[in-house]
């Protein structure tokens, strides 16, 4: 799972789109006939693997494009530069390996573009040809396309951003047929199960297949088979990197990963993941990220009682589809050493989880934690992990609970993204604090404390029930991310007692976290990560975790925060253990309340911070790609 903390100053966050169906920004009634026709042609073209170049129309006006690409509205996160000492200090063999890893990452980016939206790559080609003709709007649109890595995204004010007129987002993204409704999806599955096609249904409902129509049925094609050429090209790059990599364990991982890309066999991925999760003292970092936040189709199955029961009887779990990313970087030794401080406390934290005697955890309550953690200087974040859609991934704890490697004894690995978390504008941060936080508590706001909170968040993903919670449907990620946040906060007092944090640091984590829980705008229920932040904020408000001063500033009641977090953590763990969709729904609805105070602070945040989205700049990666 990734960290998705939404902070108003940094936008270094990922939102999650588990939304109600068909909330498309442009309804079909608004698309004129020619748009509709072109769209049909493109859907047909896509089925036949051809593209209609020149068939798109840009959706945003010149004014809107100029605004959204202005540096105040589009922030830039800079990955390592070509002359970065971290790179220059690498051994020659690792420098050579890094070049191949960057190439592999961008091959995966193109694959992810296809599973995100089948029109992404034709649209990108269209933009390139228009830019070549001198089309200024196409040039600006391409900046946004490259930032959000696709036609559709959301900005940090919860606006849907659609770059090509008429090409709105589908719940099944690019992994289900565009014209497949939730209802038809369920009906087809019921029909196939009634005809005894259990194995075919299983292939449709794994996390690693593209689902296509096959007559009046559906068929699931494993990613590795569907994108055979791209994956084998990527495997070649990994093998090439393995030839010069200087670290034995890392080399072993690369070879296993390359094998997993050549043959559609989940066990090969499990072997690669298992090796990957052991990597601690390696010079280089390479990860294929597989997360299922984007798929809004598979999770709807739990809402259909008849179908859910049929699947359960046959032992088939519908697992949302993975979206793919690649992270390339250089492990930062000092940063990593700092992270490791928490490691020895993990078994104690596991022991102190609510209802700990009722479930097995990823972290054992004694002995080997099977969890590695590294702080990484980023060279490239490609595909899903690098897409800026209202925010970007700050850290990740992988593999997720639905992955096979965890069943064969594999552990997990946390990777923290240095270039994403760095704040470039301290003056802006001060301006924000002046606007929203009680002056006497400014002393406790510390940017570094946000990183400590993130460390707690990532590790908390490994605590609690070791199961994927598919039965919670569209609420599963809200609940899981809420658990990680509250787990991070709930243990602050214990970790202070144990000596990991000083009393001063304890106050800093609490005040910083509570302050950062205020959002710039009211989210829609579709934005799960923001939804959970609002839920927490409401929960703390009801229990006196903070108050708003007469001057309209946040005042955190420091000593109340951790007990409230513990209470919320218990409630969340109970929901995960019960696995009851209705209970999860009620919990979310009861707590997802945007209060007047939240609106008051939001108005202030909007004045200070104009950013609507962001992008990454990858100088070293681009240089390596051209070599
Ligand atoms: Zn998380």
Image: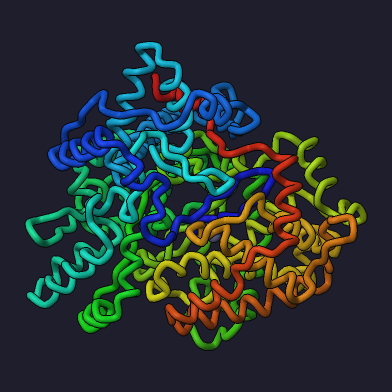
Picture coordinates of residue 297 (x, y %)? 32, 61
The image quarter containing residue 463 is bottom right
Count how many numbered circles sit on residues in the image.
0
| 553 relative to 372 in the view: left or right | right
Picture coordinates of residue 614 (x, y %)? 56, 36
Residue at position x 25%, y 36% in the image: 33
Colouring used for the render: rainbow
Query: In the image shown, does 548 or 14 lie closer to the viewer?
Result: 548
Is residue 372 in view from this perspective? no
Taking 215 as reference, is 261 above or below it? above
Residue at position x 59%, y 34% in the image: 77
Residue at position x 48%, y 65% in the image: 477
The image quarter containing residue 84 is top right
Taking 349 as reference, is 488 above or below it? above
Picture coordinates of residue 233 (x, y %)? 25, 35
Is residue 611 in view from this perspective? yes
Residue at position x 79%, y 50% in the image: 446
Picture coordinates of residue 544 (x, y %)? 79, 73
Q: Quadrant of ligand 1?
A: bottom right
Taking 171 as reference, is 229 above or below it? above
| 437 relative to 518 in the view: left or right | right
| 158 relative to 557 in the view: left or right | left
View extreme (right): residue:
440
View extreme (bottom): residue:
357
Tell me the quarter of the image containing the C terminus: top left
């Amino acid at each position: 799972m990734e960290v998705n903390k939404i902070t108003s100053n940094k936008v270094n966050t990922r939102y999650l789109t588990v939304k109600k169906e068909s909330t498309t920004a442009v309804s079909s009634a608004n698309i004129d006939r020619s748009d509709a026709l072109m769209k049909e042609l493109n859907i047909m073209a896509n089925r036949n693997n051809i593209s209609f170049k020149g068939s798109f129309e840009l959706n945003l006006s010149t004014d809107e494009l100029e605004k959204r690409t202005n540096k105040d509205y589009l922030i830039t996160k800079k990955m390592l530069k070509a002359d970065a000492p971290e790179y220059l200090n690498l051994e020659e063999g690792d420098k050579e390996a890094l070049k191949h890893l960057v190439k592999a990452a961008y091959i995966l980016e193109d694959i992810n573009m296809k599973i995100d939206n089948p029109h992404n790559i034709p649209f990108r080609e269209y933009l390139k040809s228009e830019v070549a003709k001198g089309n200024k709007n196409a040039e600006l649109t391409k900046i946004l396309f490259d930032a959000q890595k696709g036609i559709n995204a959301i900005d940090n004010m919860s606006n849907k951003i659609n770059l090509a007129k008429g090409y709105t987002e589908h719940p099944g993204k690019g992994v289900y047929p565009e014209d497949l409704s939730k209802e038809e999806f369920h009906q087809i599955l019921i029909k196939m199960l009634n005809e005894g096609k259990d194995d075919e249904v299983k292939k449709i409902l794994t996390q690693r297949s593209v689902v296509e129509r096959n007559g009046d049925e559906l068929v699931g094609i494993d990613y590795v088979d569907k994108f055979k050429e791209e994956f084998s090209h990527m495997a070649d790059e990994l093998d090439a990197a393995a030839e010069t990599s200087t670290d034995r364990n890392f080399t072993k991982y690369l070879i296993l990963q390359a094998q997993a890309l050549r043959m559609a066999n989940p066990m090969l991925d499990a072997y690669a993941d298992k090796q990957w999760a052991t990597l601690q003292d390696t010079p280089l970092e390479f990860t294929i990220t597989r997360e299922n936040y984007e798929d809004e189709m598979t999770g709807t199955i739990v809402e259909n009682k008849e179908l859910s029961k049929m699947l359960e009887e046959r032992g088939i779990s519908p697992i949302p589809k993975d979206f793919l990313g690649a992270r390339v970087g250089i492990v930062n030794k000092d940063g990593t050493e700092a992270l490791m401080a928490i490691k020895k406390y993990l078994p104690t934290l596991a022991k102190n989880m609510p209802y700990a005697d009722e479930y097995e955890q990823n972290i054992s309550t004694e002995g080997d934690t099977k969890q590695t953690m590294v702080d990484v200087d980023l060279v490239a974040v490609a595909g899903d992990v690098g897409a800026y859609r209202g925010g970007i991934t700050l850290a990740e704890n992988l593999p997720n609970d639905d992955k096979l490697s965890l069943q064969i004894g594999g552990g997990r690995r946390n990777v923290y993204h240095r270039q994403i978390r760095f704040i470039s504008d301290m003056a802006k941060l001060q301006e924000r604090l002046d606007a929203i936080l009680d002056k006497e508590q400014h002393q406790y706001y510390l940017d570094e404390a946000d990183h400590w909170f993130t460390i707690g968040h990532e590790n908390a993903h490994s605590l609690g029930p070791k199961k994927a919670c598919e039965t919670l449907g569209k609420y599963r990620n809200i609940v899981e991310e809420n658990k990680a946040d509250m787990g991070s906060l709930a243990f602050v007092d214990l970790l202070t007692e144990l000596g990991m944090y000083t009393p001063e640091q304890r106050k800093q984590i609490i005040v910083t976290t509570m302050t950062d829980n205020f959002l710039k705008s009211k989210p829609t229920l579709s934005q799960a990560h923001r939804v959970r932040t609002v839920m927490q904020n409401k929960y703390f408000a009801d229990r006196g975790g903070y108050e708003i001063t007469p001057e309209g500033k946040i005042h955190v009641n420091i000593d109340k925060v951790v007990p409230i977090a513990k209470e919320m953590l218990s409630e969340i763990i109970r929901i995960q253990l019960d696995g009851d969709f209705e209970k999860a729904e009620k919990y979310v609805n009861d707590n997802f309340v945007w209060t007047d105070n939240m609106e008051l602070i939001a108005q202030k945040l909007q004045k200070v911070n104009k950013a609507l989205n962001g992008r990454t700049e990858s100088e070293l990666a681009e240089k390596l790609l051209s070599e």
